[in-house]
């Protein structure tokens, strides 16, 4: 297992289709490390990198930041997604965030931030 930070391995970010795309932006990784440190609980990456084919198969946005390795859909063990979103919004105003019922989207797009 190839560690890329204190709490994350490269395989956690790999495209779910098995193609091998597993590049992750260092700014995105830094934000996720901060989430892990703040909440003191595991951060589960539901979706990290997506190759263009897989992104289409899951009906991802055509210009999804996942296809650039700059996004992650995350859950924090035992923490409501709203609490994760609110903490990220307060502490990373330049991050793009998406609020969902079961996870939080975070990305580091250059033309952001976007919020939904």
Image (cartoon, helix red, strand yellow):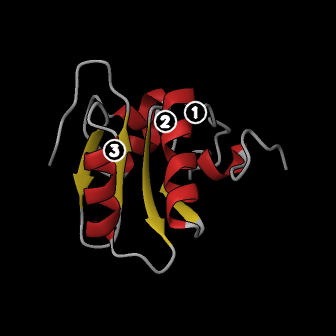
Compare residues 89 and 73 and report the one nearer the observer. 89
**Is residue 52 at all visible to an observer of this figure?**
no
- The residue under label 3 is 91
- Asked whether the residues under the numbered discs 2 and 3 touch, taking CB atoms below 8 Å apart as contact, a structural biologist would say no
What secondary structure is found at the residue carrying circle 3? helix
Judge left or right: residue 108 versus residue 25.
Answer: left
| Residue plotted at (48% across, 41% down) | 31
Q: Are marks 2 and 1 in contact (CB under 8 Å)?
A: yes
Task: Kindly indicate the quadrant of the structure image that contains residue 73.
Answer: bottom left
Whether residue 78 is situated above or below residue 62 in the rendered picture: below
> Which residue has dot 1 on it?
24
CA distance for labels 2 and 1: 7 Å
Secondary structure state at the residue bearing disc 2: helix
Q: Which residue is mark 2?
A: 28
Front disc: 2 or 1: 2
Q: Nearer the viewer, residue 37 or 54?
A: 37
Relative placement, left or right, of 20 versus 68 is right
Q: Is residue 73 visible?
A: yes
The mark lying in front, picked from 3 and 1, is: 3
Q: State left or right for residue 34 relative to residue 73.
A: right
Q: Disc 3 versus disc 1: distance between alpha carbons? A: 21 Å
Q: First in sequence: mark 3 or mark 1?
A: 1
| Label disc, if present, on residue 15 of the rendered structure | none
């Amino acid at each position: 297992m190839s560690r890329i930070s204190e709490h994350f391995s490269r395989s956690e970010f790999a495209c779910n289709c098995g193609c091998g795309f597993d590049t992750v932006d260092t700014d995105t990784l830094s934000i996720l490390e901060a989430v892990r440190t703040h909440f003191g609980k595991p951060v589960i990456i539901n979706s990290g990198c997506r190759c263009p084919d897989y992104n289409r198969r899951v009906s991802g946005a055509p210009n999804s930041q996942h296809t650039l390795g700059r996004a992650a859909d995350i859950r924090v063990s035992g923490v409501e997604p709203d609490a994760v979103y609110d903490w990220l919004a307060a502490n990373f105003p330049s991050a793009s965030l998406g609020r969902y019922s079961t996870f939080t989207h975070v990305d580091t797009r250059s033309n952001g931030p976007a919020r939904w």
